[in-house]
Image (cartoon, rainbow, N blue to C red):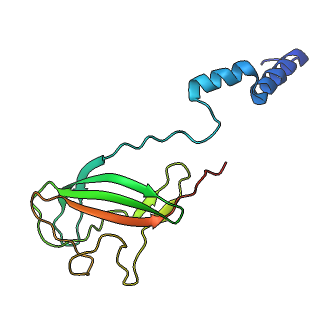
């Protein structure tokens, strides 16, 4: 069993105080290792942001799909997301993407934003041809969409 002497306790208290106080050697090491903690990390937007996978449709025609975010625009009132959808499998006809999340997540704050809906309950942005929320899909054709979300906060809470 280890004996605790006053010297050991004092040494632990001094080293802990130095670490917590942000002494220069520790602070310099921390900044070199993890970067400057003066604010949120710098975000470099690289578009398009592309993912592929199986999507589950309300028509039962589950298919491989490529989803590409091609741009984001931010104002105080809203965030606009521009994206493209390409079906890689044989898939045709009108559809709704049931397994597509209708949310936008702020990676810095973790806040989740729902899409704006119009008075008819349809997603605000791109309009379907028959105004029923269904979009035509044809082999080899990439559909482009625009969706609106609430504006993201201008600064991160600390």
Residue 132 drawn at (x, y percent) = 25, 81
Relative side of 5 to 141, left or right: right
The quarter holding residue 17 reads: top right
Query: In the figure, residue 140 lies in which quadrant?
Result: bottom left
Horizontal side, residue 110 vs residue 86: left or right: right
Q: Residue at x 87, y 20 (%)?
A: 10
Residue 58 falls in which quadrant of the image?
bottom left
Q: In the rendered view, does 104 fall on the left or right side of 88?
A: right
Q: Name the residue at 67% across, 21% down.
A: 28
Question: Percent from the top left, x then y, of residue 135?
Answer: 21, 71
Q: Give the vertical position of 103 relative to 59 (above or below).
A: above
Q: Residue at x 40, y 84 (%)?
A: 119
Q: Quadrant of the N terminus?
A: top right
Is residue 69 shown above or below 32? Answer: below
Q: Can residue 150 be seen in this snapshot?
A: yes
Q: Position of residue 61 (x, y in %)?
A: 15, 66
């Amino acid at each position: 069993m280890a004996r605790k002497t006053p010297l050991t306790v004092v040494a632990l208290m001094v080293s802990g105080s130095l670490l917590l106080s942000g002494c220069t050697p520790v602070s310099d090491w921390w900044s070199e290792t993890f970067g400057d903690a003066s604010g949120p990390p710098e975000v470099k937007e690289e578009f398009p942001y592309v993912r592929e996978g199986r999507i589950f449709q309300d028509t039962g025609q589950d298919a491989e799909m490529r989803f590409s975010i091609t741009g984001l625009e931010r104002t105080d009132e809203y965030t606009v997301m521009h994206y493209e959808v390409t079906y890689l499998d044989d898939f045709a006809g009108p559809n709704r993407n049931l397994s597509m999340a209708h949310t936008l997540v702020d990676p810095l704050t973790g806040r989740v934003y729902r899409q704006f809906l119009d008075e008819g309950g349809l997603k605000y942005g791109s309009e379907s041809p028959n105004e029923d929320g269904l979009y035509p899909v044809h082999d080899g054709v990439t559909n482009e969409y625009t969706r609106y979300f609430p504006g993201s906060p201008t600064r991160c809470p600390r």
